[in-house]
Image (spheres, grey):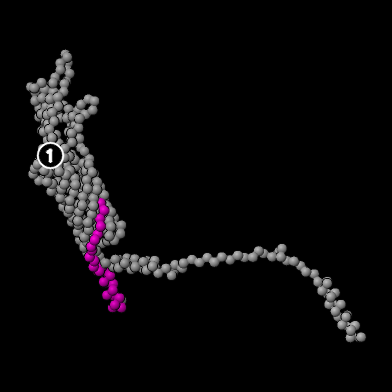
Amino acid sequence: MRNISLLVFFVSLMLSAQAQEVVIDTSYYAPPPVVRQRLLKEDPDDNTSSREVRESNRAQQTLLNQLNEVQSWYVSAEGGLRSDISRSSNSFGGLVSNSTPTKVVWSVLVGYTYRNAWSLEAGYTRAPTHLNITIASNPEPLVFNYLNNGYGIPIRLKRRLGSGKQAANGTGFWVTGGAWLTPNGNSQTGDFKLIGYSYGSRNRVDTIRLSNTTAVFKSITGIAELGLDYAARLSPSLELGGYVRKYWGLGNALKSDLTYTVNNRSTEHATITADGSGWGFGITLRYIYGRQHEMKKTDRHERTLNDQGF
C-alpha cells in the first residue's frame, strides 16, 4: 500500500510539471529560409582554345620583335580621283574654254619591299586622259568631252622617310616617283560644227561659224609622277594607305583643232591639247603574301654577352 501511494505521488508530480511547461512559438521571428541557386560559370583558366590563341599571338609578337623584315612581296589595289589639265592657244574672246575634269581612276599593282626602306611596284592602271571643250551659249553652255583608251602601265619607286628600323611594322611616309607608259589609240574621237549670230551696233548681225576636229594620237606617250604616300600596317598581312601625286604628261595624248569664222571672211584658229598632266589622290589597300626576316644584330649581341656570363 505504501508503495502504491509513492507511485501515485510521483506520477501526479510529473503531470503537474508538464502542465506548467510554457511553450513559446518562435516561428514568427525565424528568418525566411534561404533559397540557394547554383550558378556555374566557365573557368577562364580552363578555356584552352582562347588561352592557346593568346599564347600563340604573344609568341609570334615576341618573335617578330626579335626579327628585321628584310624582304616582302605584296599585291595592292588603288582607287581615287585624278584631274586632267589641258592647254588652249586661243579662246576666241571667251567663246571657247577648256575646264579641268576630275575623274575616278583605279590600279592593280604588284610590289617588292627591301628592308622596309625601298619599294618597287608595277601593274595596270585605268586612268583615261580627258580633253574638255566648253562653248559659251544661251541658255546653257555646250560641253564636249573626249578621252583616250584609258589604260596605262605604271612603274613606281618608293623611299621611306626615316629609318626602316624605327618603323618596323611598315607604318610611315614614303616619297614616290615613277612613270607610266600610255598606249593612246589612233581613232578619231569626233567632230562638230556650230553656227551662231552676233548682234552688234547699228543693227549689224554677224554670222559666226565654229568647227572642231579632235583626234587621239596613235603613238605611245608617257606620264611622269612624284608623290607622297602614307601606309599603316593593320595586321601582319594587310596595309592601308593614302597618296597624293602630281603628274606631268610626256607627250600629247589628245588634240583638238578649232576654226572660228565671222561672215566667212575673218578666220581664227585654236589648238587644245591634253597630255595627262594634273593631280591625283586616293587610298591604297595592300596584301602582303610573302616576307623574309633576319635576326636583329642587337639581340644577337646581347645573347652572346649572356652566354659569356656578362
Residue shown at the point (71%, 65%) measured from the top left: 27
Q: Is residue 27 visible?
A: yes
Q: Position of residue 260 (x, y in %)?
A: 11, 27
Q: Quadrant of the N terminus?
A: bottom right
Residue 58 in sight: no
x and y, in percent, of residue 92 in the image: 14, 27
Give the quadrant of the C terminus: bottom left
Q: Which amino acid lies under the numbered mark 1 shown in the image of this protein?
A: Leu
Front residue (pair 123, 32): 32
The answer to which quarter of the image holds residue 53 is bottom left
Q: Report crowding for label 1: few under 14, some 14 to 19, many 20 or more residues within 10 A (C-alpha).
A: many
Judging by the rendered image, the residue that carries numbered circle 1 is 254
Q: Is residue 6 left or right of residue 297?
A: right
**Count of labels in the image:** 1
Extreme right residue here?
A: 1
Residue 51 part of the magenta-drawn span: no
| 32 on left or right of 147 | right
Q: Position of residue 232 (x, y in %)?
A: 29, 55
What residue sits 21% from the left and 29% below the top? 141
Q: Quadrant of residue 273?
A: top left
Asked whether 173 or 55 is in front, the reply is 55
Q: Secondary structure at mark 1?
A: strand
Considering only vertical position in the picture, is 217 above or below 293? above
- Residue 170 in percent (x, y) is at 26, 58
User: Which residue is the extreme one toward the top?
Assistant: 202
Residue at left 19%, top 45%? 127
The magenta region covers 284-309
Choose top left, top right, bottom left or bottom right for residue 100: top left
The residue at 10%/40% (across/down) is 187
